Each structure stands twice: as C-alpha cells, then as structure tokens.
Amino acid sequence: MKIVVLTKHVPQAIGEVSYAEDLTVNRSAVRCRLADSDEYAVEQAVRIAARRLDVQVTALTMGPAGAVAALRSALALGADEGVHVLDDALHGCDAPATSLVLAAACRRLGFDLVLCGTASADGAMSVVPAMLAERLAVPALCYCDRLHTDEDEVFARRHDGTVVEDLVASMPAVLSVTDRSGEPRYPRFEAVAEARHKLVRTWTLTDLGVDPARVGLAAAATAVHRATRPGPRPATVPGTDPTAAATRIADFLSERQFL
Amino acid sequence: MAKVLALVDRDARDGSVRRSACALLTLARRLGEPVAVVGGDRPDDDAIKTLARFGATEIWCLADSPAAPAKPATPVTPVTPAVPATPTTPTAPARASDADLLHHLADRLDPAAILIPATYHGQETAARLAVRLDAGIITNAIDVLPGTDGEPVAIQRCLADSYLVESSVVRGVPVITVRPEAAVPEPHQAEPVVHTAAVEPSPIPAPRITATPEPPRDRPPLDRADIVVAGGRGIGSRAAFAVLAEVADELGAAVAGSHTAADLGWVPREACVGLTGKTVHPRLYLACGLSGSVRHRAGMQGAKTVVVIGDDPAAPIFKLADLGVVGDAQTILPALLAEIRARKANDVP
C-alpha cells in the first residue's frame, strides 16, 4: 500500500508575513516550517503504517529550494521517503495549477491513499485535496476527524458543524484530515538524525510531463488587485448594560451561525 | 443581465433552506440575476417560498430527484414536468452531485459567476467545479462586489486575517465560495420559475455515506467540542458557574475552566484548558471572566472564533477576541442565557 502525504513549507509566524510586489506571499523574508495541518496528515499515515506491513509513506512537496526542510520534518515524523517538485516556473501557482502538478507527481508515484491537511496557514484555500481527487478521478473525503483503513477501503468520520457523517470509499482515494484527528508525535532525536539519510528525490516539471505554460503566476486564473492591512479589529464593546451586551453577543453568534 | 448561480445549502435533515443561501442570493443580486441551484432532493414549497423571498428569479433542481417527503399543500409555482419519484436504495445508481449540476448549468446558462457557500461540502463542490470548467476559483470570500467592468471582485481575509485581499477571476466562469456568516440576507420578493435539469452523474466514484449519527445531545467531550464555553475567577462563585454551564447546554457546548477555576473546584481538573491541561480547537470559544494568562492561551489558541466577556479591557484575552464585551460576566451571562432561550423559542430563518 502506497500512501502519499502532501506537505507544505509555510511561514512560521503567520502574523508577520507580508505580500511581495507581485502580490504573492513573500516567503523569503520569514522563517518557514512544515505546516501544522500537514503534521496531522503525516501522523495519520504513520498510524496506518504501524498497523500494516506493506505500507510505504512518501512525503510530497512543491515549492522553492527551502521547501526540502518541510520534507525533512515529515521524514522525521515517520515518512519513508520524500519527493520535492522544484521548478522556477512554479512561482505564483494558484490552486488549480498546484493540483495539476501534484496530480502528475501522484500519478508518477502511484498511490492507494493521498493524505493531506485541511488548509495551509498561508493560503488557506483548502480546495487542493478535492481538486487533486477530481484530476486523479478518485473519491475525495475532505475534513475527516477520524479515519481507519481495511484491506481496500478507507473509513472516515467528519463533522461539518451541523451533521456528522460516516463515510466509506474504496481506495485509491484522497483524504484530508483536520486537527481533531489525533495529535502528531514529537520526533525523537534519533528520528530527526535518521531523517537526514532518507531518500529525497527532486523532480522538475519536465520529469512530470507538465507544460510550464499551464503553471505559475502568468497562468493563474485569478488576479489579485490589492492587499491592504485592515485597521485593528473592531473588537471590544462596552457591556455596562447586561441586556444590550447579551443582545450584541447573541447577534454575533447568530451572524456566525452558532445559534 | 447575466445570470449568477447561487448554490443553496439546505439542512440535511429537514431540507429547509439555510441562512447562507439567502445571503448568497443577496450577494448575487449585486452582480446580476440571482438563480438558485438546489442539488439533491427537489425543494419543497417552504424552501421555494424562502428562495423567492430573497430574490431568486429561477430555481434549478435535478430532474431525477424525488420530491421531498410530501407535505399536503398545493405548490405556489408549478414544477415543470411531473417526474415519478425513484426510490433511492443502496444499489440505486449514483445521483448527480452539486458539482455535476453546476457544471451542467454553467455550460447551459453561461452565468457571470457561481457563488457557493464555504462549508466543507461547498468547498469540495467548488474545487471540483473549477477543475472541470478550467476556471479561476476564489475561496472564503467575505464580500463580493461588482468591479469597474461589472466583473465580480471578491474580498478575502488572508494571512491570519491581517490582510484584506481583493481579487477577481481572469479565466473562465468565476467560482467563488463565500463564508456563510459574511453577508447579511436582505429580502427582495421575486417570482421564481422552477426548472429541472437532467444531469449525468460524473463517473468519478464518490464516497458513500454509511451513517449520519445523531450528534450527541449531552455535552461533547472537551477536546473535540465544536463550541467551548470557559470561565475563570471572574465568574465569581460555583453558583454563577452553573449559569455558565446552562449557557453551554443551550449552545451544545463543552464547559471548560481556567487553572484558577479548576483550583477553586468550580470545574473538574480534566476540564481545565491550558498548558498543563487540555488543548482545544473549537470553532467558537466563549471566554467569560478570565484574563487569558500565557498558560491558558496555550490551550485555546487553535480556536477559530473567540468571544470574550470580562471586566478588564487590558486583559490579554481581549487581544485574541473577535468580539469582546467589557463588563461583569456575572450579570451578562444570565442575560445572555435569557436572550438565547428567547431566540430559540421564536426561531426565524
């Protein structure tokens, strides 16, 4: 059984990140790390691997040269090997282009299960898993809180705020897990040291057979016009009158659909 | 005027139209002629009435969908062809999904934009649709406005809400998912025409839903709760903490406490949120009468939305607040409890 885990190298302190002149996220100015949400995906892959003998876990990432650090973290958490899609043409990819490249990489690797986190901290599109499933023509199970596998099926539970659903799909499938799926382990020092010696392959777009004209900033199907910093949140209101304060809170709660 | 498709999100249990659908129709009206798209079972009369009240000029649903569990009422708008209801058995062929229906309608109606609620299901639908149409996608918009040339411009909050980003789609039909809470529905009566579309389901297998367990009625476990109501020393007494617990019950939330509340015995030690206690990732964290010390914040930073009631506006918890109320939690909580109960009693869509 082959599991591909999608990982992303994201800025460490998301509040300090800014946009570059071409309105893409300025990654070079900040320290980056493996996205928290992807740690949960690696953890689930490793938990499946612990219960079966035949599991090969491959961590896959695309991004600039520094992104290999995210792969090393994933390898330290228990992935067996890493694949880094590295190409200058990839800068400024939007979600459809990202899913195109990742789908090509997944096809080349071969997979029974693609695991990913729900949303990256810097883009937070949360649509790449479903797009990937569409391109690979496999079922997608998104935002799963729990998952387990048997011989050739994957079972998951998700809770979308109002309804709990138990899902089952036959593999191959794409599955994204939430941060409620189980705390990722903290790697032992030996695992971190061992991760340095695990295999990391670097593929270019030519290796994957993806046309560079279909990816990158120039091929993006969306255009960003402006990025502005809003003023401070209009957060606090005085609550000297309890009834007025209660109404304000209840309004806020129903506005956000908690009531 | 170009049509703007709005995917209608309905309650999975009774098929009633959710507030987000009304909000999407309101946004769609700014961009063109709002068209409501209803996947799954055919909408019942109440659903059609609600969509009409918020300005839907057309309602599209699946041709092969069985009518919703019958209600003995005559339809306001005649449904075009009468199709016999097909029983859905586990072996029945796959039904067209929302993405299939929207894909079909995008080709047929050539809309100016497609608006989808940014729920879990909506995000997946939008993603699949954008790939099939090879169109640009913008997710989690908090507002959609017509741009200078009438093209839809979406506003998103990005990078942990520190930036407001305006963007538009430059290729294909814009597919935009909108945060369900972002827009306020404004009624605008219209006379919708109900159409049906025969749609081939996509050959891509979909996961089967094996069960939809009833969410547990009693308090959910703290570490996996969707809503957490937490209290600290500012609650004042064990008796006042009982009011907080009642608020939690009304919201279907778990009860948590700060270290101080646990030390004072107002909550069990297991319900203490913080560095040495539980770590929670709820959608809503309602913090009452607590200051938000470093060790407490360590356990609740994952919360999506934070509402704070406290008397010290300089307390660190207010820095995390999406809504902060400066006042005495002991007087505000009973008022809040009464308000929530009153709203639940006369629930209006």
Image (cartoon, coloured by chain):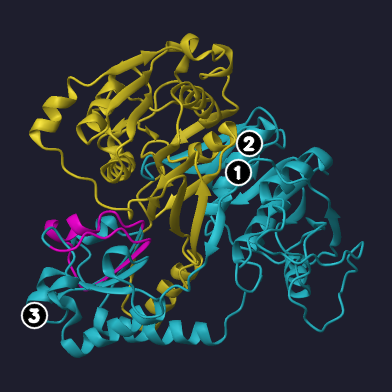
In the image, residue B172 above or below residue B117: above
> Residues at badges 2 and 3 in contact (C-beta under 8 Å)?
no
C-alpha separation, residue under disc 1 versus residue under disc 2 = 6 Å
> Residues at badges 1 and 2 in contact (C-beta under 8 Å)?
yes
Secondary structure at badge 1 equals helix
The location of residue A210, given as percent across then percent down, is 54, 15
Chain for numbered disc 2: B
Q: Which mark is residue B81?
A: none
Q: Which mark is residue B264?
A: 3
Q: Which of the 4 image quadrants contains residue B72?
A: bottom right
The location of residue A29, given as percent across then percent down, is 28, 23
Magenta residues, start to end:
B277-304
Q: Which chain is cyan?
A: B
Amino acid type indicated by mark 2: Ala
Q: Of circles 2 and 3, which is in front?
A: 2
Q: Is residue A226 left or right of residue A14?
A: right
Q: Which mark is residue B130?
A: 2
Pointer 1 residue: B126
Work out whether mark 3 precedes mark 1 in sequence or the reverse, and give the earlier one: 1
The location of residue B100, given as percent across then percent down, is 71, 45
Looking at the picture, tell me which residue is in the foreground, B336 or A240: B336
